Image (cartoon, grey):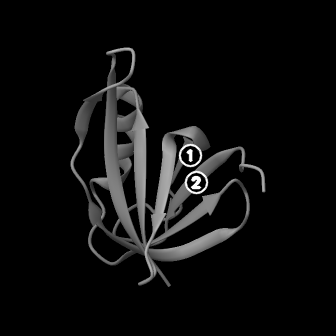
Amino acid sequence: MGELEGNVIFTKNTSVNKVGESLEVPQEMVTLKIRQTGTITVEFRGLQEEVSRIMGFFETMVDMEPITMDISSTGPVEGYFKGTNAFMEEKGPDRESVWGYGVTFQEI
């Protein structure tokens, strides 16, 4: 099976934050880790400016806030925001900084 192309789009679904506010992230910046419990860890890697923009979208969310994730226009996956992982710096193979950030998502 080939790799999906396109973007991953996250959309806030509650009045706690701006209803309908969306974040679009290029697929190549995203790694998904799916657990048997229905929990999905979404990891982002990229330049500091890009990852900071992503972090800004999630930093105002609260535990169990509804959110939708659409991977490469395959259809919305509804779930709840569960929290974030640390914003951290790593050195890439060319010794340049690569930044990482993670979000936990509980699928409905």
Residue drawn at x 38%, y 49% is 57
Q: Is residue 92 above or below residue 75?
A: above
Pick the front one: 90 or 24: 90
Pick the front one: 84 or 11: 84
Q: Image check: 84 left or right of 12?
A: left
Please name the residue that numbered disc 1 is placed on: 24
Q: How many marks?
A: 2
Please name the residue that numbered disc 2 is placed on: 9
Q: Position of residue 19 (x, y in %)?
A: 48, 65
Quadrant in which the N terminus is drawn: bottom right
Q: Position of residue 77 (x, y in %)?
A: 59, 72
Are dots 1 and 2 in contact, CB under 8 Å?
Answer: yes
Q: Position of residue 105 (x, y in %)?
A: 41, 70
**Which numbered dot is residue 63?**
none
Residue drawn at x 39%, y 21% is 93
Amino acid at the residue labelled 2: Ile
Q: Earlier in the sequence, mark 1 or mark 2?
A: 2
Q: Image check: 31 left or right of 51?
A: right
Amino acid at the residue labelled 1: Glu
Residue drawn at x 32%, y 33% is 99
